[in-house]
Image (tube, helix red, strand yellow):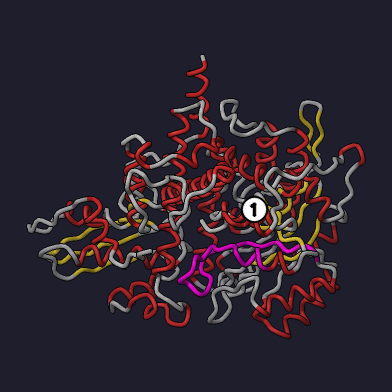
Amino acid sequence: MAATTLPATLAATLHGVAEVPGPLTEGRVLRALDSVIDPELDEPITDLGFVRSVTLTGSSVEVHLRLPTSFCAPNFAYLMASDAKDALTALPNVGVVTVELDDHHDSDIINSGLVADAGYKGTFLHEAENDLDELRATFQRKAHTAAMERSLTEFLRARPELAETALANVVLGDLPDDSAKAALLRRRVTIGLSTVDSASVLVDERGSPYPAVLAALALRRARSTRISIDGNAHFCRGLLATRYPGSEVDLMPKAEQSYFPLSSIIRTHKRKIA
Amino acid sequence: MYQKDGESYFIVDAHVALWDARPENQRNIHGKQFIDCFYDYHANLSPVSEKWPYEEYLYQGGERFIKDIFTDGYVDHAIFQPAHLGEFYNTGFGQTEEAFALTQANPGRLTYNHNFDPRNGEAGLDQLRADAERFNLKGVKLYTAEWHGDSRGYKLNDPWTYRYFELCRELGIRNIHVHKGPTIRPLDRDAFDVADVDHAATDFTDLNFIVEHVGLPRLEDFCWIATQEPNVHGGLAVAMPFIHTRPRYFAQIMGELLYWIGEDRIQFSSDYAIWTPRWLIEAFVDFQIPEDMTEYAPITIEQKRKILGLNAAKMYDIPVPVELQLPNADETATGPRQPERADLAPV
């Protein structure tokens, strides 16, 4: 499985973003920051309202980031801040790039590390044993699990007669070409899984399918992962708005529906029966 | 005791604190950051009518505590779960002397749990012996993200922690309440990882491990571990107030918990003074899984009675009137699972 070390590049590839040379604008800076994902929530930091300010001075750019609490996990904080710096440094015609994390209990450590391009281990010294590749990979796997659950839940919703055990036989080609499938395919690419039509949808992180007898349990487990991610997003979005009054205007609606009330399956079901 | 529609609910608030976060007790900026973070939780997730001014939030004192918990709060018995946070606060965050004095002044209504830090080594073991005797400890509250000199966290399966668990066993401290927070070394791992609970629960099957906040933000890992380890329980602190802000999401959390770990291992708590118990209890008794969410079975009155008090009462041998007691439910459909069924474990 390929652990991604250049998320901006990968994201640009996946989203088909072509870097056209041109003057640096706030819009270009923000589009570059769109590629920076909160690994835990699987959402861009621009949608989450984590970008506090963008200041352009000639070709130089200074970006300030903010998080929902002072005690947000410092590894995630560092990961997002350093990804932001990478994404901005990759912009054409950019001069000095400054990224600062505000109001975090480790702001000083993280900001010094960013200035020095010290890397994660260089920044946290004895507190880190390895770089963040494995951590990133863990959350990429979770993001895939959640995307898989969303797709299959939608699939079930459209087929009320289908038993959960039948999900073991669903392949990518069976899924409708919608945003849930597109999100699933992106996450499969990220963790190195096949995207061919004949590939099973309900798989573990190595791409191994589940037998029918375990399909329902696998879906329940994937659902608990999705609910956990959604819950964290509820906390983070709510706390950011409380901590920084006015920041709610920066909270963008999610680009793809990541929250399916389970009831919606049932509602559809009942309508169809009636 | 809370009564509604002819039903009586024996209430145990399994996670309360008497803290002092006033500026004079703040040791550094982190003391302020910590209470500010708590206050944001309080402000964001409380109904407007229950929201306190910041100044009142910094410190409540015993009188206010008694009023909020017992006079107004319907609670029959409350359990202190103090966080030490000695690196952030001069006399610590949880006020040991004040809370213990209150416990002695209110016999039968309060249990004082204390804490330990395995990084205190041998001296800490001696201290735990003394604390167990003085406080008559049945439980401890561990905050694995506690800062300690150069260290900013430990794990439940560290060798030194095991030394402390062995001593807990010897001293009759059976209930280990665990709060998982961020900033655990090494930082390159998942800072909220709950896997160490799994190891400790497997190796100390005679101790109860109550994972506070039902493992949030790792609900799924918590559910999975609790499914396999019958001595792992979930505390609802911090999950409770979703009942107000996001009731449909709260329904999903309850649905998942009842599905995975069942009704006998979930404990209510207000996490006072982050929230006050009164409105949470009223809301929970009135709560029901939305009818259209037939994915989950409705919550029964018996399940609510267990969660609101009977489960914690059983764990702490708190006397409950005979007519309010309930038998254990059958095992959940999911487990406890045999190790060979752990084939779904990697996410």
Residue B287 visible in the picture: no
| Residue at 18% in and 65% down | A90
Residue at the limit of the structure toward the left, as seen here: A22
Q: For the image shown, how many numbered marks are present on the structure?
A: 1
Where's residue A28, x and y in %? 17, 54
Question: Is A228 included in the stretch rendered in magenta?
Answer: no
Near mark 1 (Cα within 10 A), the count class, few <14, some 14-19 or many ≥20, is many
- Quadrant for residue B221, please give it: bottom right
Q: In this picture, is A164 found above or below B339? A: above
Magenta residues, dominant SS class: loop
Name the foreground residue: B208 vs B18: B208
Q: In this picture, is B264 found above or below B193? A: above
Where's residue B310, x and y in %? 81, 45
- Letter of the chain that mark 1 sits on in the rendering: B
Dot 1 amino acid type:
Ala
Name the foreground residue: A215 vs B63: A215
**SS at mark 1?**
loop
Name the foreground residue: B18 vs B236: B236
- Quadrant for residue B340, please give it: bottom right
Question: Is B182 included in the stretch rendered in magenta?
Answer: yes
Residue at the limit of the structure toward the right, as seen here: B322
Span highlighted in magenta in the image = B174-199
Where's residue A200, x and y in %? 42, 46
Residue at mark 1: B273
Residue B230 visible in the picture: yes
Position of residue A206 in the picture relative to residue B155 (left or right): left
Where's residue B97, x and y in %? 76, 68
* Image quadrant occupied by the N terminus of chain B: top right
